[in-house]
Amino acid sequence: MIPLTEALQIVLDSARPLESERVDLADALDRVLAEDIPADMDMPPFDKATVDGYACRRAELAHTLAVIETIPAGVPPSKQIGPDQCAKIMTGAAMPQGANCVIMIEQTETVGDNAIRFTGEQTPDNIFRRAQDIRSGQVVLPRGSRIGPQHVAVLASVGHVRSLVARRPKVAILAGGDELVGPAVRPGPAQIRNSNSSQLVAQLAVMGIEARDCGMVKDVAAEIDRLLKAAIAENDVVLISGGVSVGDFDLVPGVLRQNDVRLLFEKMAVKPGKPTIFGLSRTGYCFGLPGNPVSTFVIFELLVKPFLYRLMGYDYSPVEVEVRLAEAVVRKDTERQSWVPAKLTSATTATPLEYHGSGHILALCEADGLIAMDIGRTSIEKGTPVRVRLL
Ligand code: AMP
Ligand code: MG
């Protein structure tokens, strides 16, 4: 039984980066950059007005100013501002030569047909300077960035319409167990519905990975062998849930070994999730996940997700918040590190959720995150500062 930190190190160290490919801007979301992205021009590319108003000279704010032209956004100014002159200017339009500030339209009044006067007491420049945000040539997004909507905006603004990104891993999902029926079926006596496959598909979808759901497999070595062989041959990563423990029908580890999968660990000192196995095939990776739905969920978060991101070249670190525990957590068995689902109950507190064991997936529906309780620890008292790893 190895601690999670060790298991995580093993899986991360085993991950060989996937090849890269070019994708259009419209397909860049959730991908990981395999190249640095430089800016092709300054941003903003010119000094621009940040308000609707009049571009003028600060030294002449007390004067009546003649309006010599109107400058809409998208049209270069055609005139230079001379003494006692100004130009009407729109937000985002380029500043005319000779002006050094923009007075807001709300702080002016018209004088005669074609002049204005400043009615305010003072004004900022109201100019957004060229290159204030980004300098031409600057790396705006480094390799290894995971592309979110805001990164897509940056790619668009620097004109990078085909980015080099890591290929997405091909991930197969298998659910093992004689008792399983599909979610659309009403289970017979002693049967249960397969929830792990749908859950894993969804956990992968959150990462932008479209899983290949290979269905359910009976606890029969030949069947597991046939499906695992195909899944290993056609995918980078195989996630099989169920059948990895020490019961008479937990046949997955043996079948993996028969298929030349080198198992690097077979038990983790983690609760839930002890019977988690990880192995390397000639071309890919296999995770055997515990059948219990909460275990599968938690182990995906703690181990599989960082691994898959590493394959894509992204250094994932979960977001954690530090709060105080609103109720004590107590346990007897301290052999493993346990991960307790918790709900953020105020800006400064988290409440551990009542949870009846690793089949109780409903408990996770209310959880905002997980709190770790270290090996050897029997309790965390109410009021103790704890870190909640957000889900
Ligand atoms: P196992 O790891 O095969 O011993 O399964 C542990 C527990 O998880 C048993 O109660 C199983 O019935 C349950 N289980 C296994 N696979 C699934 C699945 N795909 N969906 C929901 N529960 C499962
Ligand atoms: Mg089973």
Image (cartoon, helix red, strand yellow):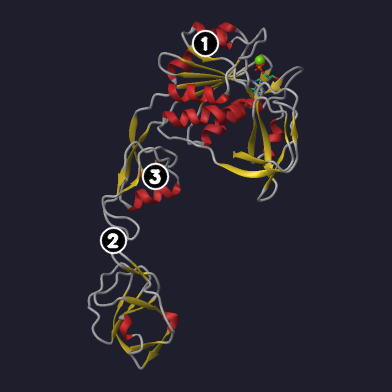
Label 3 CB-ligand 1 distance < 8 A: no
User: Measured from the top left, where is residue 269 in percent x and y?
Assistant: 62, 21
Location of mark 2 (residue): 45
User: Measured from the top left, where is residue 350 in percent x and y?
Assistant: 69, 43
The quarter of the rendering in which ligand 2 is drawn is top right
Label 2 CB-ligand 1 distance < 8 A: no
* Secondary element at tag 2: loop
Location of mark 3 (residue): 26
Q: Earlier in the sequence, mark 1 or mark 3?
A: 3
User: Measured from the top left, where is residue 73 in percent x and y?
Assistant: 33, 69
Using the image, determine if residue 157 lies above or below residue 383: below
Q: Quadrant of residue 183?
A: top right
User: Measured from the top left, where is residue 190 in percent x and y?
Assistant: 75, 17
Q: Earlier in the sequence, mark 1 or mark 2?
A: 2
Q: Quadrant of residue 325?
A: top right
Q: Quadrant of residue 169?
A: top left
Location of mark 1 (residue): 256
Residue type at mark 3 is Ala
Using the image, determine if residue 107 lies above or below residue 268: below
Quadrant that contains the N terminus: top right
Who's the residue at 44% across and 14% down the image? Answer: 281
Residue type at mark 2 is Pro
Distance, label 1 to label 3, CA atoms, is 39 Å
Using the image, determine if residue 48 lies above or below residue 83: above
Who's the residue at 58% across and 22% down the image? Answer: 3
* Secondary element at tag 1: helix
Crowding at mark 2 (Cα within 10 Å: few <14, some 14-19, many 20+):
some
Distance, label 1 to label 2, CA atoms, is 58 Å
Residue type at mark 1 is Leu
Which is in the foreground here, disc 1 or disc 3?
Answer: 1
